[in-house]
């Protein structure tokens, strides 16, 4: 859609309260477009008070609605954890999952208020435009989408932040461009994504980022922080013996792990549209809980189940990245993973030290397949090593047949 095509529609604008949000909202209202602003409360760690978004948007004259999606975001974090769904470079794709939660939650609110168009501020060079529009198309096929930063008219009028700020100031709206940013940040309960500007240069170290959830490992306390995690059917239900719901568990895990420098990653990833993108990511809580759950999985999953999980995990990670988490494949993958996670119950003791996670103990794991007597190198009442002779001889048949057939390279 283009600006002139919005006439007669009621537009729901996804806003953050920043320069872009205020510019687009003001421009649409100036064109006599009926619009409302919507923002999602995802427990963003870089937003002290989500009400600040409403305050920032107030000078535009548009009403701003805040939709509380914190619990939905926490549940989505737990889905990622059960799936062990990390993307390129082994990082947790926190922004990709947040877009699924945001679009589903805001679409519901927009439709309640009679909106017929969703407007988003994603650029025409990144992944988010795909996610916003794909989710809108599948969750509300009758809802149209307007992308102002793909509209030639707005791109010509506002080629940069300087022009946006000037436009707003002319209309009496505060627009502090501030000093040049070295990178941009997107944040939610699951973590933060830092990208663009100086980070686009591969000569720039990841340490130019000033972490929000984390500290750099060398800045963390010089002592091991011992943590106990209780998992039941693949869900973390308690930290250090204190039970909680997914939201409170994620908040505690973020605080504990972040203070120890856990969960900072740099990745040069493959974007949906075929380009490469460089980012620095913070996901302390996911890294801590994901490591702990992996310990339980290693105890309760046999070799074939482990192989299946390792096959399914990247499928779900790809669905998150591509904006496909509500599609049949992703739902089937989650259903299969939940079947495997059913047995993932246990208490894991870990040590956290300056960016590192150490295994300390696994207890109360009723479905564990581990039997020390079977695995021991010492004499024990476990597996009789003599009985392995027959198994080894059976293996010889295939090995020798391959050799005789000239199929060994």
Image (spheres, rainbow, N blue to C red):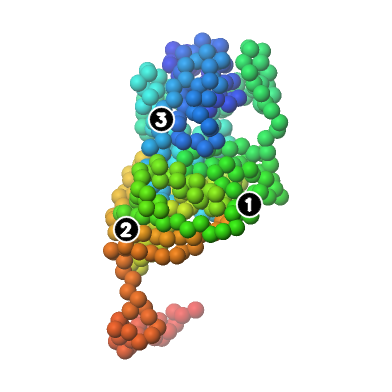
**In 3D space, how far apart are the residues under numbered discs 3 and 2 (Cα atoms)?**
31 Å
Q: Which mark is residue 345?
A: 2
Q: Secondary structure at mark 3?
A: strand
Q: Which residue is mark 1?
A: 219
User: Alpha carbon of mark 2 to alpha carbon of mark 1: how far?
Assistant: 34 Å
Q: Is residue 381 left or right of residue 20?
A: left
Q: Which residue does the numbered mark 3 point to in the structure image?
A: 68
**Percent x, y of residue 292:** 42, 57
Secondary structure under tag 2 reads loop
**What residue is at 56 percent from the left and 47 percent from the top?**
214
Mark 1 touching mark 3, by CB under 8 A? no
Q: Quadrant of residue 136?
A: top left
- Estimate the x, y position of residue 289 in percent, counting from the top left: 43, 53
Q: CA distance from mark 1 to mark 3?
A: 34 Å
Q: Is residue 243 visible?
A: yes
Q: Is residue 56 left or right of residue 372?
A: right
């Amino acid at each position: 859609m283009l600006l002139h095509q919005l006439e007669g529609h009621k537009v729901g604008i996804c806003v953050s309260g920043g320069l872009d949000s205020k510019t687009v909202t003001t421009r649409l209202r100036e064109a006599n477009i009926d619009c409302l602003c919507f923002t999602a409360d995802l427990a963003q760690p870089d937003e002290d008070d989500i009400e600040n978004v409403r305050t920032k948007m107030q000078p535009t004259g548009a009403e701003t609605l805040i939709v509380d999606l914190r619990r939905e975001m926490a549940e989505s974090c737990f889905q990622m954890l059960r799936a062990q769904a990390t993307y390129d470079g082994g990082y947790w794709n926190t922004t990709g999952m947040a877009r699924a939660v945001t679009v589903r939650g805001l679409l519901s609110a927009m439709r309640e208020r009679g909106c017929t168009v969703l407007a988003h501020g994603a650029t025409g060079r990144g992944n988010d435009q795909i996610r916003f529009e794909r989710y809108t198309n599948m969750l509300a096929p009758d809802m149209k989408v307007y992308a102002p930063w793909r509209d030639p008219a707005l791109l010509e009028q506002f080629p940069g932040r300087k022009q946006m700020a000037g436009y707003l100031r002319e209309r009496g709206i505060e627009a502090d461009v501030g000093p040049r940013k070295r990178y941009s940040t997107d944040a939610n309960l699951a973590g933060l994504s830092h990208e663009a500007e100086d980070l686009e240069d591969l000569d720039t170290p990841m340490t130019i980022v000033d972490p929000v959830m984390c500290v750099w490992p060398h800045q963390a306390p010089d002592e091991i922080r011992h943590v106990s995690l209780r998992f039941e059917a693949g869900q973390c239900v308690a930290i250090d013996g204190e039970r909680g719901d997914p939201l409170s568990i994620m908040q505690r895990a973020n605080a504990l792990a972040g203070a120890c420098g856990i969960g900072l990653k740099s990745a040069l990833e493959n974007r949906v549209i075929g380009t490469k993108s460089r980012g620095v990511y913070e996901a302390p809580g996911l890294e801590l809980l994901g490591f702990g759950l992996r310990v339980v999985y290693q105890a309760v999953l046999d070799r074939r189940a482990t192989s299946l999980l390792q096959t399914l995990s990247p499928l779900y990670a790809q669905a998150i990245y591509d904006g496909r988490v509500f599609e049949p494949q992703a739902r089937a993958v989650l259903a299969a993973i939940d079947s495997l996670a059913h047995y993932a119950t246990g208490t894991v003791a870990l040590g956290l030290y300056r960016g590192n996670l150490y295994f300390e103990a696994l207890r109360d794991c009723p479905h564990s397949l581990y039997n020390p007597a079977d695995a021991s190198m010492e004499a024990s009442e476990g597996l009789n090593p003599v009985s392995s002779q027959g198994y080894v001889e059976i293996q010889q048949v295939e090995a020798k047949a391959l050799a005789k057939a000239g199929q060994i390279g």
